[in-house]
């Protein structure tokens, strides 16, 4: 059995790093596949590039970055990433197994990602051994979550009520990409008022009172890549 893998991430260095790790990851005793049968058939930075890739060739497993290089345009897919893109891909390509590569450790976001159709959720700190274990699980049609993230899913603490919601995360993430509230509302198919409410709730949870403080907190924590 041949396993075709594609990688979609906005940063070239991460795509190349994942590609290298896939080809050099150590085999596990429980591996049910032969390493030479794994092929990385292509990589892309954008949703439109990903659709072209999936249209032109058969892809069994997709390593998908939570944020892609989106662009506004007449085709709504070109501006889609995150949970919305995962849901769309799951409907359009039901046999495609998605491994989400994300810097976010928000537990609700992890749940929503898996519910949207992803088979695995791993962080950018993933090592070769964990990557190999992830591939083995997904190929065997199992769901895989990195151990540290799995532990977070089952932790019940007082901070849960202050955790940013997936909508709030998306609003902040798009703000860091340089989008204004109107553009965010169009991309998320929400009203400006709703997007503004998500932003204000996020600011309250982060204990900031203005945009300057908000960007300082986001830059300090490195929660998102901020476009300059």
Image (cartoon, rainbow, N blue to C red):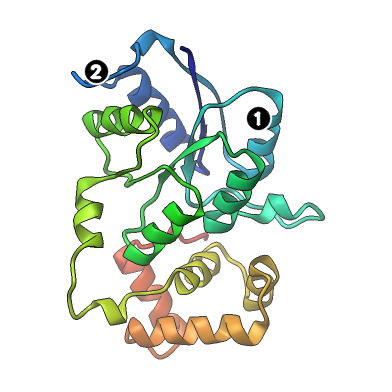
Residue at image mark 1:
53
> What element does badge 1 sit on?
helix
> What element does badge 2 sit on?
loop
For this rendering, which residue is in front, 29 or 172? 29
Residue 5 position, x and y percent, is 49, 25
Identity of the residue drawn at 22% across and 60% down: 152
Mark 2 → mark 1, Cα distance in angstroms = 28 Å
Identity of the residue drawn at 55% across and 50% down: 86
* Residue farthest toward the top in the current orientation of the protein: 36
Is 77 left, or right, of 32 in this rendering? right
* Residue farthest toward the front in the current orientation of the protein: 141
Identity of the residue drawn at 18% across and 66% down: 155
Identity of the residue drawn at 46% across and 33% down: 15
Examine the image and state in which quarter residue 206 appears. bottom left
Residue at image mark 2:
27
Examine the image and state in which quarter residue 182 appears. bottom right
Examine the image and state in which quarter residue 186 appears. bottom right
Name the N-terminal-most of marks 2 and 1.
2
């Amino acid at each position: 059995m041949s396993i075709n893998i594609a990688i979609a991430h906005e940063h070239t260095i991460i795509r190349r790093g994942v590609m290298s790790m896939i080809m050099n990851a150590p085999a596990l005793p429980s591996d049910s596949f032969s390493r030479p049968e794994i092929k990385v058939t292509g990589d892309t930075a954008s949703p439109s590039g990903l659709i072209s890739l999936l249209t032109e060739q058969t892809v069994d497993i997709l390593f998908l970055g939570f944020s892609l290089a989106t662009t506004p345009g007449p085709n709504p897919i070109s501006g889609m990433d995150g949970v919305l893109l995962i849901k769309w891909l799951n409907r359009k390509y039901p046999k495609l197994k998605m491994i989400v590569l994300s810097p976010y450790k928000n537990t609700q976001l992890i749940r929503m990602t898996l519910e949207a159709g992803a088979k695995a959720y791993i962080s950018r700190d993933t090592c070769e051994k964990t990557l190999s274990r992830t591939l083995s699980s997904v190929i065997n049609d199992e769901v895989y979550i990195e151990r540290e993230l799995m532990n977070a899913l089952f932790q019940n603490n007082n901070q849960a009520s202050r955790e940013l919601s997936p909508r709030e995360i998306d609003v902040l993430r798009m703000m860091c990409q340089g989008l204004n509230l109107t553009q965010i509302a169009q991309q998320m198919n929400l009203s400006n008022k709703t997007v503004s409410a998500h932003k204000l709730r996020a600011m309250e949870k982060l204990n900031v009172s203005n945009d300057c403080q908000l960007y300082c907190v986001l830059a300090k924590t490195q929660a998102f890549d901020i476009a300059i």
